[in-house]
Image (spheres, helix red, strand yellow):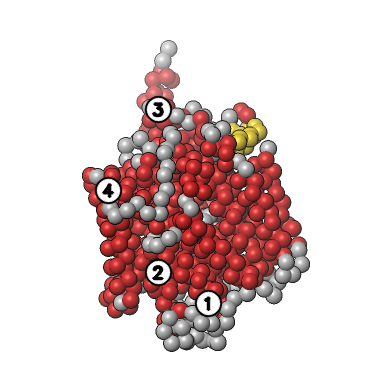
């Protein structure tokens, strides 16, 4: 009952947020709701660790075996804590970011609606419940991305995100229904891998589920919608694209890994998609000038890393994935909020137009330094532990999958480090900015500083989350108990050597980024170079042209044309039926 009340509390706050007057305290007051949910979820961690997760359900469509069901196991709690905790910080940040704007209440109300939908996704224990919440995240994210609806860029980005994730959602619906039929139950916790594997629906269900997960978590070739969504206000980017929406697909892969992980095709498809996305996201990030787009493409790469680790599927890989989920949410949330603070304090987010901000914005610099270390995955930050575990998992895997995984990790590690150097560049050199730079307010700084401090603090004391959070989450993703031991320092080993080499290469690449990426940037900008946005535009505008042609051809304004179309269609249907079943009809008609 507690889970249902927590969700009801978040959704119930939506109209309150829209109605509250615009005062400095509104964001903090609204943040109390997700903060309370965060504290409540903390109390459930012991039960999840002991293998007795809290559950709640009520019959929804009894005739079809569909229930409104929720379950708080280790995997759900890990994601739920990130959604609620970072959500509380984002609400405080949003109030400061939107200070004085009449639409601030609408933004915060929509953020809360999205938060409720995401909590519904991660705690759902029924595939229909999961899909309803999943689709609600697509709708609310559309409202958030198009928040500044007077801007054409925002409207186009919102439609693009809705179409890509919405199409994936339709595939997911079919896949989940097929999976439920194959398993003989719609309850996720009751599904058995053996029953699913024995069904003829298994492969089709797996393909459809992967399409839904890949579109949501921006895997190649569906990755292009995420950078486009940077047209949204920074609080939206900080929340949707660090800890919540883009991680929904990763969550789904981890949730269904015990059920689908042994099917032929699961490991190669998930691992290959993740490795390709990791490389593409990290590479393209260096060609951007806008801080938010740099962070967006590194997010694409990070989602690829998580997907690849789930595809590998070993205990070590799943442990690394769970650590990196937390580490990435902390450093990327801090960096997105800091990017908004830089924009707020200087009038631009373009790296080339900024310099020497360290003196005017020392607290923002501290947040970016912690986030940049997390992006590089080097130093006393939680993502370093995750990256070392990922390298160890690739080395342990061996074979072609392990070799490609390690290669992708080293390559992307260098590029992520280079991106971290680029992100830090505005704080060094001679001071320059479109306007006189000034430090952000307490509301703008609280979120990034807290997240940066947590990234460092949890790395120095990983035992805090080792057995209570990471272990149960990895066990839920593996479908069996997983032994977890987290350490910041493992001594000198192959993983550390590979990590150090990639960081050293990345620092050099970051310092010379513009010279190194000039030729490839011109190549990617060529009209003939294939890219996701170009294919999307071709399909989108092609469908519009086809619809206009079809309408002009069919709707001519003549009654005889409409009657003729109806008659021709009727004759064609009857003819098709006769060709297919005519012989059987004749035999039955002539039979005595």
Mark 1–mark 2 Cα distance, whole angstroms, equals 18 Å
Whole-angstrom CA distance, mark 3 to mark 1, is 57 Å
Mark 2 surroundings: few (<14), some (14-19) or many (≥20) residues within 10 A? many
Compare marks 3 and 4 and give the one earlier in the sequence. Answer: 3
Q: Which residue is mark 1?
A: 362
Q: Nearer the viewer, mark 3 or mark 4?
A: 4
Say above or below: 559 vs 102. Answer: above
- In the rendered image, is residue 201 in sight? no
Considering the image in quadrants, where does the N terminus appear? Answer: top right
Q: Residue at x 54, y 82 (%)?
A: 360
Going from the N terminus, do you reach mark 2 or mark 3 first?
3
Answer with the quarter of the image where residue 411 lies: bottom left
Drawn side of residue 498 relative to residue 37, left or right = left
Disc 2: which residue? 420
Residue drawn at (38%, 62%) of the image: 378
Q: CA distance from mark 3 to mark 4?
A: 29 Å
Residue 395 is labelled as: 4
- Classed neighbour count for the residue bearing mark 1: other residues with Cα under 10 Å, few (<14), some (14–19), many (≥20): some
From the image, state whether disc 1 or disc 2 is nearer to you.
1
Instruction: Judge by depth and name the residue closer to the eye, 448 or 98.
Output: 448
């Amino acid at each position: 009952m507690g889970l249902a009340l927590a969700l009801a509390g978040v959704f119930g706050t939506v109209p309150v947020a829209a109605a509250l007057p615009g005062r400095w305290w509104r964001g903090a007051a609204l943040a109390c709701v997700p903060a309370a949910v965060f504290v409540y979820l903390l109390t459930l961690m012991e039960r999840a660790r002991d293998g007795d997760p809290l559950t709640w359900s009520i019959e929804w469509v009894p005739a079809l075996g569909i229930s409104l069901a929720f379950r708080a196991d280790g995997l759900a709690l890990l994601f739920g804590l990130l959604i609620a905790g970072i959500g509380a910080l984002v609400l405080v940040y949003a109030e400061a970011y939107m200070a004085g704007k009449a639409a601030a209440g609408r933004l915060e109300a929509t953020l809360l609606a999205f938060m409720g939908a995401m909590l519904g996704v991660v705690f759902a224990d029924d595939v229909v419940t999961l899909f309803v919440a999943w689709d609600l995240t697509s709708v609310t994210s559309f409202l958030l991305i198009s928040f500044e609806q007077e801007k054409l860029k925002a409207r186009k980005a919102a439609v693009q995100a809705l179409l890509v994730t919405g199409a994936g959602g339709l595939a997911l619906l079919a896949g989940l229904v097929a999976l439920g039929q194959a398993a003989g139950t719609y309850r996720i916790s009751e599904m058995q891998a053996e029953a699913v594997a024995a069904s003829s629906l298994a492969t089709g269900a797996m393909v459809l589920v992967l399409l839904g997960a890949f579109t949501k978590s921006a895997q190649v070739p569906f990755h292009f919608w995420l950078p486009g969504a940077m047209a949204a206000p920074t609080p939206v980017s900080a929340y949707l694209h660090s800890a919540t929406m883009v991680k929904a697909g990763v969550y789904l892969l981890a949730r269904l890994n015990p059920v689908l992980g042994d099917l032929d095709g699961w490991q190669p498809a998930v691992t290959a998609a993740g490795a390709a996305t990791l490389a593409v996201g990290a590479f393209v990030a260096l060609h951007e000038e806008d801080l938010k787009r740099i962070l967006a493409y590194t997010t694409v790469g990070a989602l690829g890393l998580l997907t690849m680790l789930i595809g590998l599927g070993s205990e070590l890989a799943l442990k690394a994935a769970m650590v990196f989920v937390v580490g990435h949410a902390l450093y990327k949330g801090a960096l997105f909020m800091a990017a908004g603070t830089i924009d707020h304090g200087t009038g631009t987010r373009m790296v080339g137009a900024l310099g020497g901000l360290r003196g005017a914005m020392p607290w923002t610099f501290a947040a970016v330094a912690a986030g940049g270390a997390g992006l590089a995955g080097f130093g006393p930050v939680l993502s370093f532990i995750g990256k070392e575990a990922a390298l160890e998992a690739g080395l342990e895997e061996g074979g072609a999958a392990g070799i490609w995984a390690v290669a992708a990790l080293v390559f992307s590690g260098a590029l992520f480090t280079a991106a971290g150097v680029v992100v830090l560049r505005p704080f060094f050199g001679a001071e320059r900015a479109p306007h006189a730079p000034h430090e952000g307010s307490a509301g703008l700084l609280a979120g990034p500083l807290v997240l940066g401090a947590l990234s460092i603090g949890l790395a120095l004391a990983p035992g805090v989350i080792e057995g209570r959070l990471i272990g149960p989450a990895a066990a839920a993703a593996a479908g069996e108990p997983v032994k977890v031991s987290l350490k910041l320092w493992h001594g000198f080993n192959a993983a550390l050597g590979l990590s150090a080499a990639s960081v050293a290469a990345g620092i050099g690449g970051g310092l010379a980024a513009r010279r190194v990426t000039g030729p490839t940037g011109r190549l990617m900008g060529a009209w003939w170079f294939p890219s996701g946005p170009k294919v999307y535009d071709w399909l989108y505008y092609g469908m519009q042209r086809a619809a206009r042609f079809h309408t002009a051809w069919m709707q001519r304004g003549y009654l005889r044309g409409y009657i003729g179309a109806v008659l021709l269609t009727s004759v064609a249907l009857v003819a098709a039926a006769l060709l297919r079943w005519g012989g059987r009809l004749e035999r039955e008609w002539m039979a005595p």
